[in-house]
Image (tube, rainbow, N blue to C red):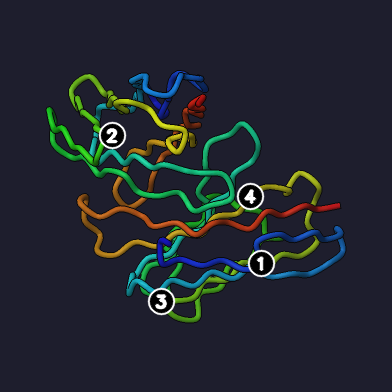
Amino acid sequence: ILNVEQSPQSLHVQEGDSTNFTCSFPSSNFYALHWYRWETAKSPEALFVMTLNGDEKKKGRISATLNTKEGYSYLYIKGSQPEDSATYLCASGTYKYIFGTGTRLKVLA
Amino acid sequence: ETGVTQTPRHLVMGMTNKKSLKCEQHLGHNAMYWYKQSAKKPLELMFVYNFKEQTENNSVPSRFSPECPNSSHLFLHLHTLQPEDSALYLCASKGRDSSQETQYFGPGTRLLVL
């Protein structure tokens, strides 16, 4: 993998459902993986910075895992709420980032 | 709020106009970035400044001219743009050059070139 890829591109879930999406990145010369939450017309908000293989981070109902050997990270949202609706971006790098195109999440009430 | 502000939030300009985008960060960071996001594409790095010095120009056309007078302010001067330059322009800043640090973004300027 030469680029950062995210899947799915978009998804709709019902309120209360748990969901997850994937970020794939080049595993060679890995430094850090960043997750952002981006609501329309607002600034992308930093969620997690992950650097260690096997790392798992949590912020409220949102958590993320990292596998640097195979080059992927998962973002999990437990019990989705309408306010979780946003685009979730991941980026690889430390000084210069390579971004994925994002996963657009819509939580239906 | 992320501590990074951008003005204007929206801009419509003709191809012969000259305009400037402004970014200001209140975080004490040393590095500042300009990104472009076109529809359906990932964020694309344009320029990087570190301690007011330009350290990265990602093959950006000369009709985009950045300026960083100090570590807190970053400008993007625009002249003779093309309609395909219509996009969302995001500014970001970052503190120490450490893998534990992350970039903080402004809300962007939505640019439409007619």
Task: Determine contact: label 1, label 2, CB under 8 Å.
Answer: no
Pair 4/2: label in front = 2
Kind of residue sitting beneath label 4: Leu
Tell me if residue B78 comes above or below residue A7 in the rendering.
below
The reply to whether label 4 and label 3 mark residues of one chain is yes
The residue to which callout 3 is attached is B71
Kind of residue sitting beneath label 3: Ser
Q: The disc numbered 1 marks a residue on which chain? A: B
Name the residue rendered at 32%, 28% in the picture: A77
The reply to whether label 4 and label 2 mark residues of one chain is no
The residue to which callout 4 is attached is B88
Helix, strand or loop at label 1? It is loop
Tell me if residue B97 comes above or below residue A22 in the rendering.
below
Pair 4/3: label in front = 4
Q: Earlier in the sequence, mark 1 or mark 3?
A: 1
Pointer 3 local density, CA inside 10 Å: few below 14, some 14–19, many at least 20: many
Distance CA(mark 4)–CA(mark 1): 12 Å
Tell me if residue B65 comes above or below residue B100 in the rendering.
below
| Label at residue A62 | 2
Distance CA(mark 4)–CA(mark 3): 23 Å
Pair 2/3: label in front = 2
Distance CA(mark 2)–CA(mark 3): 33 Å
Helix, strand or loop at label 3? It is loop
Distance CA(mark 1)–CA(mark 2): 33 Å
Quarter holding residue A97: top left
Q: Residue furthest bottom?
A: B69
Q: The disc numbered 3 marks a residue on which chain? A: B
Helix, strand or loop at label 2? It is strand
Q: Earlier in the sequence, mark 4 or mark 3?
A: 3
Please state if B54 lies on the left or on the right of A96 as rendered. right
Q: Nearer the viewer, residue B81 or B55?
A: B81
Name the residue rendered at 58%, 56% in the picture: B108
